[in-house]
Image: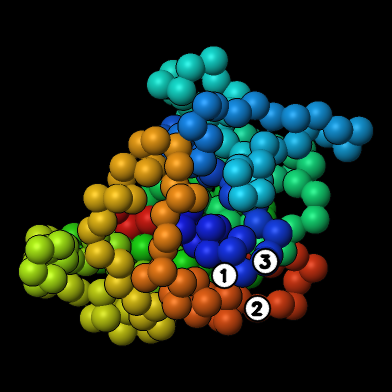
């Protein structure tokens, strides 16, 4: 989600991130090294902007401490997501990227039913176990008549910095096979990059070059319909 939002922003678009992972939010930690709080406006609360201008809304922006647990049942989770969408003054956006937890939980159901989505981006990893979870999410999307833009595989391989040799740490990829079984485009693979983890932990994900992700983001943008007043992409993690 973070990389997609960054790539869209680098392309000159006005971008927001709605962190719909209410019980396991991580987006603010990636973008705000010194923390952040909501702003105010006559139109309502406003999401804080990252260093490059990405607007972010997450439950962690409302907690006194980032490691406080959010122990809520489904109706409260759904209510929070609806408020993040309806009660927050986002301003003019070209893309709102929604980050979801894995599986077919209340969060996914709420987003598919309540937000005017343009499409879903499925994210998997090499294990077939992750592919099974993604296939469940794809079946849910189809039952909800939500369009799927394609599938991305994360943590596909590790490239040794000394030799350039690639190692498939989680076994051979099943991403193209999974995409074929689901009947959606395979958008590409991402390697394991320790630099991403380091920058996320430091709240400086926007310092990541991300050249390897740019073609994938451009493909997502090309596949995103423009029929709606605003364009939305939901990122649905498989693992």
Which label number is shown at residue 12? 3
Give the quarter of the image for residue 117: bottom right
Percent x, y of residue 73: 48, 29
Q: Are marks 1 and 2 in contact (CB under 8 Å)?
A: yes
Frontmost residue, 28 versus 152: 28
Residue that badge 2 annotates: 225
**In the drawing, does residue 225 fall left or right of residue 121?**
right
Q: Can the viewer see residue 157 in this picture? A: yes
| Label 3 vs 1, first from the N-terminus | 3
Check contact, mark 3 vs mark 1: CB within 8 A: no
Which labelled disc corresponds to residue 39? none
Toward the right, the furthest residue is: 42
SS at mark 3? loop
Q: How is the image coloured?
A: rainbow
Residue at numbered disc 1? 119
Look at 36% across and 36% down and name the residue there.
201
The first of marks 1 and 2 along the sequence is 1
Distance, label 1 to label 2, CA atoms, is 8 Å
């Amino acid at each position: 989600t973070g990389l997609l939002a960054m790539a869209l922003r680098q392309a000159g678009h006005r971008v927001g991130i709605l962190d719909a992972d209410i019980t396991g939010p991580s987006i603010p930690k990636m973008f705000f090294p010194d923390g952040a709080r909501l702003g105010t406006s006559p139109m309502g609360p406003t999401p804080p902007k990252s260093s490059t201008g990405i607007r972010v809304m997450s439950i962690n922006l409302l907690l006194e401490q980032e490691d406080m647990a959010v122990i809520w049942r489904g109706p409260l989770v759904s209510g929070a997501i609806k408020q993040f969408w309806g009660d927050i003054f986002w301003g003019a956006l070209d893309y709102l990227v929604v980050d979801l937890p894995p599986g077919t939980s209340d969060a996914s159901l709420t987003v598919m039913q309540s937000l005017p989505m343009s499409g879903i981006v499925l994210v998997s990893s090499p294990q077939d176990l992750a592919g099974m979870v993604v296939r469940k999410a794809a079946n849910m999307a189809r039952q909800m008549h939500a369009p799927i833009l394609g599938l991305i595989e994360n943590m596909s391989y590790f490239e040794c910095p000394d030799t350039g040799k690639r190692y498939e740490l989680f076994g051979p990829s099943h991403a193209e096979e999974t995409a074929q079984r689901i009947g959606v485009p395979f958008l590409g693979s991402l390697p394991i990059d320790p630099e991403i983890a380091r920058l996320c932990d430091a709240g400086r994900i926007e310092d990541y070059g991300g050249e390897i992700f740019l073609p994938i983001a451009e493909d997502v943008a090309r596949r995103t319909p423009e029929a709606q007043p605003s364009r939305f992409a939901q990122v649905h993690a498989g693992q």
